């Protein structure tokens, strides 16, 4: 398991004690990668003193990694956590598929199609996807309570 920690520059107007950070991990497209990704996000948020975000962050990570694993790609996926501002943390999963996720409102009796709806609810609609030349990145932003 590879884990990379990178320091970045503070955004304009950031408080003097704001220390932006980024961490990422490369994972294979295997079922056990979801568990490794959840541990990585849990440990990273705890290390940054963001314990209140752990439950939501772990659940979001599980959904995004599970969706990435279903793409059938053979390369590695990247899971990252980074401060996008003084008040938000972004969890992102980069995979090798250009197919964008679609938010589906599942009916009461359906047993699937609830993952992105859960991500949407936990982030208050602050999630999205970007197509890249060799795949996509799906991200979800969590607000840091003041």
Image (cartoon, grey):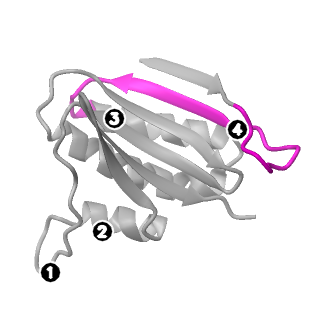
Image coordinates of residue 42 in percent, x first then y, are 53, 42
Q: In this view, does 86 lie to the left or right of 99?
A: right
Image quadrant in which the C terminus is located:
bottom right
The label nearer to you, 1 versus 3, is 3
Mark toward the start of the polypeptide (4 vs 2): 4
Q: In which quarter of the image is residue 92?
A: top left
User: Majority secondary structure of the magenta segment?
Assistant: loop
Measure how far apart labels 4 and 1 are at the Cα level.
40 Å
Residue in front for this viewpoint, 121 or 62: 121
Residue with the mark numbered 1:
107
Measure how far apart labels 2 and 1 are at the Cα level.
12 Å
Within 10 angstroms of label 2, few (less than 14), some, or many (20 or more) residues? some
**Circle 2 — which element?**
helix
- Residue placed at 38% from the left, 67% from the top? 120
The label nearer to you, 4 versus 2, is 4
Residue with the mark numbered 2:
117
């Amino acid at each position: 398991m590879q884990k990379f920690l990178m320091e970045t520059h503070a955004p304009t107007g950031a408080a003097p004690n704001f220390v932006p950070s980024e961490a990422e991990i490369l994972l294979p497209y295997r079922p056990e990668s979801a568990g490794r990704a959840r541990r990585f996000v849990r440990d990273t948020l705890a290390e940054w003193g963001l314990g209140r975000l752990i439950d939501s962050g772990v659940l979001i990570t599980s959904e995004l990694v599970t969706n990435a694993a279903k793409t059938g790609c053979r390369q590695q996926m990247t899971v990252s956590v980074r401060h996008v501002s003084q008040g938000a943390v972004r969890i992102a999963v980069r995979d090798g598929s250009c197919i964008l996720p679609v938010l589906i409102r599942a009916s009461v009796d359906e047993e699937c199609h609830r993952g992105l709806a859960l991500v949407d609810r936990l982030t208050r609609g602050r999630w999205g996807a970007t197509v890249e030349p060799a795949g996509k990145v799906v991200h979800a932003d969590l607000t840091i309570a003041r």
